[in-house]
């Protein structure tokens, strides 16, 4: 008997770790094969869409137990070969396709078109860029749906939008508007000082900010399909972005060097689930894409964070608060691709006009620092 | 899953000393190029990231990855890669192009961004974002002619091929829409095999080099 088995990603990893390679060749087309080819005495565990989605919330240990139990029952585990939307792989896949690119904040359809023309991989639709939120104060909320729709109509690249931390109804509205990514963002005023959004409940993928590895892993546990370091938005000061990406990289590298018995304490110290900590230790990277945000204002800033290990860059106020947005945006795009080529960065940095004026993060009173929102 | 444990292709593994593993260039302007490098390495190929025209020299094949097609177009022209790449493909350089990569090499685009161009090497008309926005992205299993009866396929804001020229063979379809074609040495896919553990596509490509 050749059991033909396909497993969802997480199940496949568990099977790997258990040393149990499923036998056989290609995946089952269950609709035909359940009745005809699989022996009646072996139960079949179906991982269709509902299963794949609920499984993605489980810990690796849960999954291993689940596989072991069913394997002991002689089960054939199979993923139904239907078309499935909103799987972890589909959500993280869009983030993968944004890698090496620049995601730009825009507040009008015109700005969105300028960003697209300049080579943005995606745009973030919002009502006020962080520099204005900072200057004007008040409660910052999700943008008007009409504004988001206007930007969606103006460009063909992915459109992201921000929801307040913990404001799952804003996220529901953004999903209903069919945005391509939701940013649960500290740039807006938090709606909940205890809980972030349960992002597994959504079909739309989420990106979340983090200042360190523990925070990143907690967001991934909640379902984030992409992480961006927070930096200090709306300042044009890249120092916090550098600090955050360095912290995350350093903590990952440290985990990578730990012995298996040390990972339990590491998980406790990071306040993150053990299984995720172990995965990071094994792979030497996050299981999702890691971008940098907050304070990037020049091509050299973008190349700096890329050399420090970012997989792409968010640029907020840095473009449309500068003298020549179109030219600066195109230059930042090129510097993000050629981040290891100083000659190219020099070339694109010529004559960009005035950079955004900016504020030194050290001059921002601690209560007004956005990176400290979220936990 | 099963494919992860199969040995590398006949030319690439440590057990094949007679011929060097093929060197595959991976266009690394933007997008999911690291995943292709991983898959190519797993099937025994050597890889080189291609960002500059000189990096096209001496490669046995090229992968044009997914990403944002309008960005790949702009960067390939801005960095002087578009013409050398077009020349190499026209001269018969074997190529595996996926998703946005398909749009970069296609002859005609529907739904292109303003000013977006393509290399015009692959004789197809391709529709950008044909399935809709990200919420319509999906994964499935496909029968792809010449590659396998059951290929894992992830579609992310994917294009489809609306019409093909005379020398283009259709390899796979979803709901009657063509999502994989072959034209000479170019294999073009709407979807992302590199986001899965399924190495059939890469093994087939490297095996032909």
Image (spheres, grey):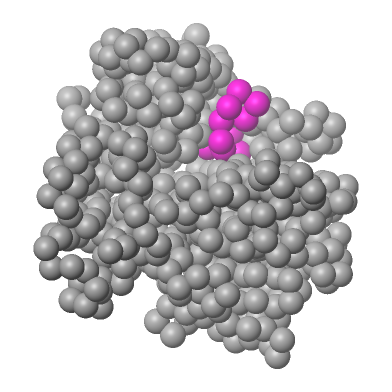
Dividing the picture into quarters, in which one does residue A14 lie?
A: top left
Residue in the picture at 43% in, 16% down: A255
Which sits in the foreground, B47 or A173?
Answer: B47
Q: Is residue A80 left or right of residue B8?
A: left
The quarter in which the C terminus of chain A is drawn is top left
> In the rendered structure, which segment of residues is drawn in magenta?
A306-321
Q: Residue furthest bottom?
A: B166
- Compared with A337, A78 (above or below) is below
Q: Is residue B78 left or right of residue A121?
A: right
Q: Is residue A7 left or right of residue A111?
A: left
x, y percentage for residue A199?
25, 43
x, y percentage for residue B48?
74, 44
x, y percentage for residue A143?
34, 47
Q: Residue furthest front?
A: A1
Instruction: Inspect the magenta stretch and tell me whether residue A308 lies in it.
Output: yes
The quarter in which the N terminus of chain A is drawn is bottom left
Q: How many marks?
A: 0
Residue in the picture at 79% in, 32% down: A341
Q: Is residue A59 left or right of residue A113?
A: left
Determine if residue B48 is in view: yes
Which sits in the foreground, A87 or A352?
Answer: A87
Dividing the picture into quarters, in which one does residue B188 lie?
A: bottom right
- Compared with A354, A173 (above or below) is below
Which sits in the foreground, B82 or A276?
Answer: A276
Residue in the picture at 47% in, 47% down: B5
x, y percentage for residue B117?
71, 68
Residue in the picture at 61% in, 63% down: B204
Instruction: Inspect the magenta stretch and tell me whether residue A62 lies in it.
Output: no
Determine if residue A211 is in view: no
């Amino acid at each position: 008997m050749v059991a033909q088995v396909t497993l969802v990603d997480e199940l496949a990893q568990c099977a790997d770790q258990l040393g149990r390679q499923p036998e056989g060749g290609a995946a089952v087309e269950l609709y035909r094969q359940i009745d005809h080819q699989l022996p009646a005495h072996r139960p079949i565990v179906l991982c269709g869409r509902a299963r794949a989605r609920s499984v993605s919330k489980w810990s690796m240990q849960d999954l291993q137990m689940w596989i072991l139990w069913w394997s002991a029952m002689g089960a054939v585990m199979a993923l139904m070969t239907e078309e499935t939307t909103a799987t972890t792989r589909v959500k993280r896949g869009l983030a993968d396709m944004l890698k090496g690119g620049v995601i730009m904040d825009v507040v009008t359809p015109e700005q969105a078109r300028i960003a697209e023309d300049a080579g943005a991989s995606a745009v973030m639709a919002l009502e006020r860029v962080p520099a204005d939120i900072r200057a004007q104060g008040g409660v910052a909320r999700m943008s008007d749906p009409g504004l988001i729709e206007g930007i969606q109509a103006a460009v063909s690249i992915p459109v992201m939008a921000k929801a307040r931390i913990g404001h799952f109804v804003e996220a529901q509205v953004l999903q209903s508007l069919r945005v391509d990514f939701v940013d649960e963002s500290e740039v807006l005023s938090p709606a909940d000082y205890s809980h972030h959004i349960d992002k597994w409940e959504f079909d739309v993928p989420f990106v979340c900010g983090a200042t360190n590895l523990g925070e990143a892993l907690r967001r991934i546990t909640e379902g984030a399909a992409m992480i961006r370091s927070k930096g200090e938005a709306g300042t044009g000061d890249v120092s916090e972005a550098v600090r955050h990406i360095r912290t995350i990289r350093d903590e990952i590298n440290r985990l990578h060097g730990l012995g298996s018995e040390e990972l339990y304490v590491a998980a406790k110290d990071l306040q993150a689930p053990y299984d995720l900590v172990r995965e990071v230790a094994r792979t030497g990277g996050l299981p999702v894409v890691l971008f940098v945000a907050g304070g990037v204002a020049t091509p050299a800033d973008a190349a700096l964070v890329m050399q420090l290990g970012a997989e792409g860059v968010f640029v907020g106020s840095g473009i449309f608060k500068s003298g020549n947005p179109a030219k600066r945006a195109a230059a930042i795009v090129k510097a993000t691709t050629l981040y290891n080529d100083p000659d190219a960065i020099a070339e694109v940095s010529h004559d960009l006009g005035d950079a955004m004026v900016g504020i030194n993060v050290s001059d921002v009173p601690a209560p007004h620092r956005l990176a400290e929102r979220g936990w | 899953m099963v494919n992860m444990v199969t040995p590398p292709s006949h030319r690439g593994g440590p057990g094949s000393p007679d011929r060097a593993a093929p060197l595959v260039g991976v266009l690394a302007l933007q997008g999911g190029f690291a995943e292709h490098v991983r898959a190519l390495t797993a099937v025994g190929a050597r890889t080189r990231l291609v960002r500059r025209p000189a990096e096209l020299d001496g490669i046995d094949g090229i992968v044009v990855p997914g990403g944002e097609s309008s960005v790949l177009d702009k960067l390939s022209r801005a960095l002087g890669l578009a013409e050398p790449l077009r020349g190499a493909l026209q001269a018969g350089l074997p190529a595996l192009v996926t998703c946005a990569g398909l749009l970069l090499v296609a002859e005609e685009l529907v739904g292109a961004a303003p000013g977006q161009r393509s290399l015009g090497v692959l004789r197809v008309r391709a529709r950008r974002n044909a399935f809709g926005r990200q919420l319509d992205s999906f994964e499935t299993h496909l029968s792809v002619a010449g590659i396998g009866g059951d290929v894992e396929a992830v579609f992310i804001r994917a294009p489809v091929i609306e019409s093909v020229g005379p020398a283009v063979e259709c390899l796979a379809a979803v709901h009657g829409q063509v999502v994989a074609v072959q034209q000479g040495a170019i294999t073009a896919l709407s979807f992302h095999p590199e986001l899965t553990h399924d190495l059939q596509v890469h093994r087939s490509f490297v095996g032909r080099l």
